[in-house]
Image: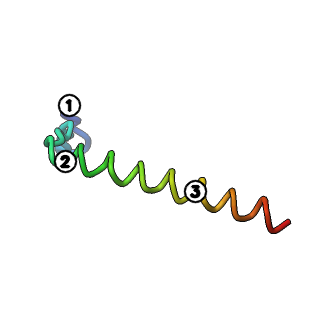
Amino acid sequence: MTLNLLFVTLTLKKKRTSFEEAAHNESVSKHFEETKTRQQHFTSHTL
């Protein structure tokens, strides 16, 4: 998408993710969810 505004051109491109990057993001999300679950478990027992 290209937008011309007051003699300034702004071009936006959709970023493509590689397989390695997608796998890394999935791994990070999995670890985040596991940590969040452990924290919820810990805080529910301490209250």
Label 1 vs label 3: CA separation? Answer: 38 Å
Location of the N terminus by quadrant is top left
**x and y percent of residue 5 in the render?**
26, 41
* Label ID, residue 1: 1
* In front of the other: 8 or 29: 29
Residue located at (79% from left, 63% from top) = 45
* In front of the other: 16 or 14: 16
Q: Mark 2 points at which residue?
A: 8
Label 3 vs label 2: CA separation? Answer: 45 Å
Helix, strand or loop under label 3 = helix
26 relative position to 23: left or right: right
| Sequence-earlier tag: 3 or 2 | 2
Q: Image quarter for residue 19?
A: top left
Q: Which colour scheme is used?
A: rainbow
**x and y percent of residue 25 in the render?**
30, 49
Disc 1 residue type (three-letter):
Met
Q: Name the residue under label 3.
A: 36
**Which circle, 1 or 2, is nearer the viewer?**
1
Helix, strand or loop under label 1 = loop
